[in-house]
Amino acid sequence: MRATFHLPAVLKIAAAASVLTAANLGAAQTIKLGLSVPLSGAGANWGKGSEWMCAQAAKEVNAAGGVKVNGKAYQFECVTYDNKYNAAEGAKVAQALVARDGVKFVAGSIGVAPARALQSLTERRGVLMFTAAWGNSMKGPKFPLTFSQMNSPNEIAEPLITHVKKLHPNVKTVAILNPNDATGQETEKVAKAAWEKNGAKVLVSDWYERGTSEFQPIAAKLNAARPDLIDLASTPPADAGLIFKELKSLGWNGVKVVEVGTGADGLLATGKDAVEGAYLGAAVALDSMTAHQKELNEGVKKATGESTNAIQIGFYDAVWAIKAAMEKAQSIEPADVAKAMPAVTFKSFYGETGFGGKDVYGSDQQMRLPVIITKLVGTNLQEVGRVQK
């Protein structure tokens, strides 16, 4: 017969308190990493892949013993919200992550407008934030808690444009197209200056609204300028494919560039053979990947249906950078971690790296990452150039 014992009431209360304390301690060991990304619309692939990359990096960190600070081991957990790539939703996401969820570390944000909305809160509330947004206006000493997790036009445009100009010396005239938002406006300035520096005349620099589905009028305007090359700059892959398809139907067959070109799949899905030969500035060719990079690429492909790209990779890198800075600072306070960040080296998708950018932005808050120039040949990407920053 099994004996049954009954605890006195005071011991029951003590035991319950012990369980609650243990639960609270367990909760305190988990650090939430917030993500503000598009999970719907034209940029959804970027957001979904970024979410997977953050989760994978957190999984790797946790499996290796977590983040070790002052004798404690902390675990990472990624928390993702859909910013729909616009300022209004970005503001809602900011409130959800910072005000409601109490997130102290943002492992990534996409889109200048929604990232600005988030930054306006993170800097005031003492939250460390990583961003893949391409805006110069978000960088520098006045934003001590903000760090960049991918190359921006300042890093990509000139190496990409210089390389394409060398491959196509006969290119004399260019047309540029960008989405009509903060991302596009800041990209346009850098791209235009880079083309002019390389001796090409910018015949037209035009805009379109995100969410546009009919690109024939836009393509007709670009085609009318008869440029040797069209640079779709910060246009997402699905939109870029449609634009090149319309241009082909109009008979234009010049050199194609997409500075934020992040992969073959999105372009091919909408552009078919019209995207042949396009040069991309934010993609990674499979044939140049290491075994570990290929594993990560396969994970993203299962999650999104497309290969990984520089935007998504930044979310993997940010997790490792946060870990390195926490361990260097021996603190999980965002201000302490931010102070340590510029001096750390960390495990990135591309290998060991750190931060730079002081000569451009006034502070070392930009990840030092290679600029990989790829070309779409058939249905595959080929690496045609690499500049180590």
Image (cartoon, rainbow, N blue to C red):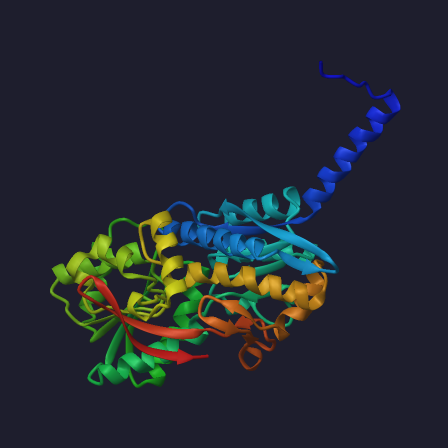
Which quadrant of the figure contains the N terminus?
Answer: top right
**Residue at horizontal 42 percent and vertical 49 percent from the top:** 48
Give residue 179's quadrant in the image.
Answer: bottom left
> In the image, is 235 to the left or to the right of 313?
left
Q: Is residue 41 visible?
A: yes
Point out residue 234 in the picture as x, y percentages from the top left corner: 37, 63
Point out residue 63 in the picture as x, y percentages from the top left corner: 55, 53
> In the image, is 259 to the left or to the right of 119?
left
Residue 228 in the image: above or below residue 262 = below
Which of these two is toward me, 280 or 31?
A: 31
Residue 328 in the image: above or below residue 236 = below
Q: Is residue 209 visible?
A: no
**Residue at horizontal 74 percent and vertical 39 percent from the top:** 22
Q: How many marks?
A: 0
Residue 165 in the image: above or below residue 244 = below
> In the image, is 360 to the left or to the right of 2?
left
**Residue at horizontal 39 percent and vertical 69 percent from the top:** 188
Which of these two is toward me, 138 or 144?
A: 144
Point out residue 181 in the picture as x, y percentages from the top left corner: 43, 58
- Residue extending farthest to the front is 1
Give residue 220's quadrant in the image.
Answer: bottom left
